[in-house]
């Protein structure tokens, strides 16, 4: 919800019978403006089902010299991924 949507929602709530007062709407708007990024991050963390990719490193190696191998320039990929969920981190 951006600031315009918030103001429209709070205005509708103040006009609603049994809704909030304009002072309460002002407090909610101020709280939202000050803590919007924290609220967003918290909602994202609570809505994740699986692990997330926190970091990834990769490289491709080429074998340059072997005695008994016909395919000498076969690339080998090495991938390191750091996965985590809700503050827990594990490496694969």
Image: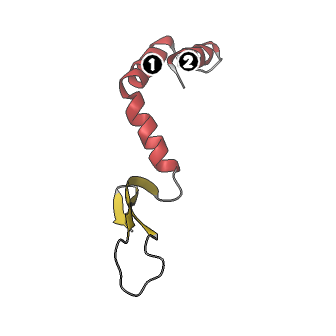
Q: How dense is the environment of label 2, judged by Cα within 10 Å: few (below 14), some, or many (20 and up)? A: many
Tell me if residue 47 comes above or below residue 21 in the rendering: below
Q: Position of residue 18 (x, y in %)?
A: 62, 21
Q: Please report the residue visible at 39 percent of the width from the left and 67 percent of the height from the top.
A: 62
Measure how far apart labels 1 and 2 are at the Cα level. 8 Å
Camera-side residue of 48 and 18: 48
Residue named by callout 1: 29
Give the percent coordinates (x, y) of residue 45.
45, 48
Say if 77 sits above or below 8 in the image.
Answer: below
Please report the residue visible at 35 percent of the width from the left and 65 percent of the height from the top. 90
Q: Are marks 1 and 2 in contact (CB under 8 Å)?
A: yes
52 or 37, nearer to the observer: 52
The residue lying at 43 percent from left, 83 percent from top is: 69
Q: Which mark is residue 10?
A: 2
Residue 65 position within the rendered picture, expressed as x and y whole percent measured from the top left: 34, 76
Q: Which quarter of the picture shows residue 82?
A: bottom left
């Amino acid at each position: 919800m951006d600031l315009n949507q918030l103001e429209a929602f709070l205005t509708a709530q103040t006009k609603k019978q049994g809704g909030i007062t304009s002072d309460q709407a002002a407090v909610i708007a101020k709280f939202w403006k000050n803590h919007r990024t924290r609220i967003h991050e918290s909602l994202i963390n609570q809505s994740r089902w699986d692990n997330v990719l926190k970091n990834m490193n990769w490289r491709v190696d080429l074998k340059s010299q072997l005695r008994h191998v016909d395919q000498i320039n076969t690339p080998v990929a090495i991938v390191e991924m750091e996965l985590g969920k809700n503050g827990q981190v594990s490496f694969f």
